Structures are given as C-alpha cells and as structure tokens.
Amino acid sequence: MSASSSSAHSVVEPSALTKRIALGAVILYALITMIPLFWIVITSMKSPPDSISYPPKIFFQPSIEGYCNLFTNQTRQTPEYLETLPPPQNRCEEVTRQRNMVIVGPSNFLKRFANSLIIAFGSTALSVLLGTIAAYGFSRFKVPLKDDLLFFILSTRMMPPIAVAIPIYLMYRELGLSDTKLGMILLYTAVNVSLAVWLLKGFIDEIPRIGEGGMDWPAVGAGTTLFLIPILIFTVLLRKHLLRGITFGAVRK
Amino acid sequence: MTGQKTPDKLVERAAQATPQAIAKRVRGLSDRAIAWIFITPTMLLLLAINIFPLIWTIQLSFTNFRANRTNAAVKNVGIDNYTSILSDPDIWAAMQSTAHFVFWTIVLQTLIGFTLAWLLDRKFRGHGFWTTIILIPMMLSPAVVGNFWRFLYQPQIGLFNYIIAFFTGVEPSSFEMIGSVQLAPWSIIIVDTWMWTPYVMLICLAGLRSIPDYIYEAAEVDRASHWRQFWSITIPMALPFIMLAVLFRGIENFKMFDMVNLLTSGGPGSTTEVASITLKREAFEKWRTGFSSAFAIILFVTVFGLANIYVKALNQVKSR
C-alpha cells in the first residue's frame, strides 16, 4: 500500500496501484454483500420445487407462481371440477390450475401494502409539516430556552421505544387508536419529528430572508410547498441518512 | 440569493425586513407568541407520545398492574418489581445475550466499516457508484431482512449453509445457524453486521474526508512513513467519528427487536433472547405490566447512563 507516489501530481494523491487494490477490495465486498439480495430476487422468480432444491439452483425455468400466490387466494379442487371450467384467462390461472387449484380472489397483500404506504407517507408528511413549522420558529424567532428545547426534542430520540410501549398501548386502547392507521401515523411522526426539526432548522437557517420581507405570503407558501416536495421524497427514500446529517452537525460543532 | 448585489431597492428593503416587523403586521401578535404557535404542535406531540407515557411507565413500575385484567385491584408494591428483576436469572441471561450481541456487532462493524471507508477514501474511479451499492442493505426494513435471512439460513436448502459447505467441505445439513444453541447468537450478529456495516462506513468516511490534505502534505515533507501517517494522523483525527458510529450502533442494538424477533424470535430456547424480546414476552405474553415497566425503566436508565458516560469520553477526544 505504501508504494511510492512520486509520479502522482500531489503528494497526498494515492498511487495508481493503491487505487487498484482498493477498488478490487471494495468490489469484492460489494459483490459478497449483494449475494443475499440477489438470491431473494431470483428466488421470487422460481417455482416452489426449484426454490427448495439441493444443491441451490442458479439456472432455472422462470415462473410467475410466487407472484401469483402472493396476490391471490386459492382453493384446491378436484380434477373433474377443473375440467368443467372455461379455459384459463391468463398465465396466473394456468399456473394455478396445473396444481389443481383455482383462484378465488385477490389476497390481502395489496391491502397490507397500501396500509404500509399510507402510514409511511402520512407520517412522513406530518413530521415534515410539524418539523418545518417548529424549525422555522426556532430559526427565525427568539425563543426562550431555545437550546434546551432543541436538546429536549433530540433527546426523545434516545429513548428506547420499549420503555413507552406499554403506556402507549394502554393509552391507544382507551382512545380507540390501537389498530388504526391514524394511531400508527402519530406514533411514527413522534419518532421522526425530532430529526425533522433538527435537519430542517439547518436548511432554514441557510435560506436567505429576502422572500419574507415582501409579505407575499401566497408566494412564500408556494415556495415552501415546492421546497417540501423534494424533502418529502428525500425523507421517504433516505430516512436513515437523516441521522447522518445530524451526526455531521454534532461532530463539527 | 444575490439580494445584496441587486440594485433593486425593493429587494434591498425586503432583505432588511426583520421577523419582528412581520410579526407586528400579522394581527399585532408579538414575536414570542408567533414563535410559540410554531413550536407548540411539535412539543405537544412529543409530550403526548414520549414524555407522558414515560412518566406513566415509571408509575406502573411500582405497581402489580396487569394490562389484561384492568378490573383487578391495583396494588402499590414499592420497589418489589425492581428487586425481583435484579434477582431474576432469566433477566440476567437476557442481559448477557444483549451484551454479547452488542459487543460483537460493534467490533465487526467498526473494523469492516472503517476498512471499507479507508479503501473508498483512496478515491479511485467509480467510488461513488460502489458506495451506493454497498449502502443498499441498510435501506431495507429490518423485518424484511429478518424474514429472508431465515430462508438463507435453512439447513438443507439455504444458500448460506451451501456456501459455507462449498468452501469448508462440511455437509450443508450438518449445522443449523438458527437452530443450534452455539450458532444462533452468531446468526443474528452476522445479519446485523451485513445490514449495518454500511452505516458505520458512511460515518467513518465522513471522518476521513474531514481530515485536511495539508496535514498529510506536512507529514510527507517530514518524511513520515505511510504507516506512521495512518496511526498518527488518520486514526486520531477520525476517532471522534468512529466513536460516534459506535455510540449510535450501540444504542440501536441495545434496543434491537424487530430483526431478531423475525429471525430467531429469541430461540432456540432463549439463546438469542435479547432484552427487548424478554420485555415483549413479559409485557404482552405474560401480561406482567408492572414488572415489565420496571424492566423498561432499568433498560432506559442503563442506556441513558452508558450513553452519557460515553458522550463525555467522546467530548474529551474531540477537544484534544
């Protein structure tokens, strides 16, 4: 690794050999780390017997059975009954009938997936909204005990969720919020809003104040809304990176 | 953005307008009142869903309350819950599993994560692309990860066993990762390391990038060897970041629940029963609400205390 760097244009620029070795090692790690994901994706395209074959199959006849089973409910029928049915309408029905099964309707999967999406988007939107408003307050106005309040907001994140799970369960049962989407949205919002405040405060601190002086509130509103859209997407996609944003601030302080 | 340089008077005047001025024009509300209107919703939510339940947990921890028998008389039992937790061998076993899990995940993730960050900091062509690829596991949901690693760990058909067998020559069905008492603790460590090493790598990378080039240039002028530069510049200057990564992973893994719950659900027996899983069993299977509240408080105080001591050490390292 300590090859001479005399030919490099800067003394701190790593030599070509170092770079090549580093690249090789990183690619090796990336490939190994991707094996589990690669495997789960190709397993989704296998037929059930192929998926549990030994030795594991890398080459196989692709099948849509996994996806059919995920999206539909099926029941077993006698071959005599299957004879009486009209020919299969699509690939899924065909595959199902080969196993003496009939599709009886859609499965719960789509509903559950929709639940996840609603809760994820709902809580993201709500935490960005509350976070933006609070961050704006902290960033632009004199707030008594500002630093203490900001630290309080961040410290709620250090609490193990299990420490409050029981009372939240009791509270939700009383309020009729248990097993509802609204309850879940509020819960996730409470977890995420502290990050939103800290991160957005950084953003708002850096936006110049020009826009506010003109008192053109609809324009400010429109600007903020447009400003929110990328953050909304950003938060959904990069939820875990937000912590990193704060980490940097914490270390550089 | 270029407000000051624009000759436009309006823009200039606008740029000078203070929030106070705006505040007065908005229905005569004072500066402070508006600030509170902005901050209150967030504070209320945090009080309702974090602080109020925490106080409630503390109160419950001194009672024999059971959440599945709300009509039964609730008795105040003082610190009985706390004493019985501290003398309960199952709880100590859970704490030991947690410590084993936290220790080894931190060691492995820090070593691999830092090495990767150091390699990526060689700034070879395409390092951005490979960073993104490496980050993928940590974007996944822990529940999904727990589920599909269960499949990979299947003794006969699982890919993990097959690959190990392929390289070592043992029978793939001769060992069970999540079924055996010796290997199960390592099965959760492997999955957590696979998933979260990228996170440690990211923080370490930030640390390495924050070291200014001129320090290395000066060292080069002084003819310090690369080995010497690594130990006297790179490690000390990246240390606050490494310590921060350790802190975050430590806190997270102390609270670890979802991935382990789906992968081994604490089994076999209670070999991988980390603290959160014990807590869930006590609270929502045995319904010993008072007892589990006390356990939750003990866990919280432990994490909070350890984190505080650690942050003090971190600050010392930073101020050096």
Image: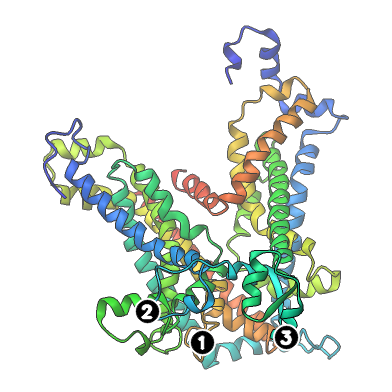
Nearer to me, A230 or B240: A230
Q: Residues within 10 Å of mark 1 (few under 14, many from 20)?
A: some
- Decide if residue A193 is on the left or right side of residue A218: left
Foreground disc of the pair 1, 2: 2
Q: CA distance from mark 3 to mark 1?
A: 46 Å
Chain on which label 2 sits: A
Q: Position of residue A50 (x, y in %)?
A: 47, 76
The residue located at (56%, 74%) in the rendering is B257
* Vertical position of residue B7 compared to residue B55: above or below: above
Which structural element holds mark 2?
loop
Q: Which residue is mark 2?
A: A55
The residue located at (62%, 50%) in the rendering is A236
The residue located at (32%, 42%) in the rendering is B211
Q: Residue furthest right?
A: B27
Badge 3 and badge 1 both on one subunit: no
Give the image's coloring scheme. rainbow
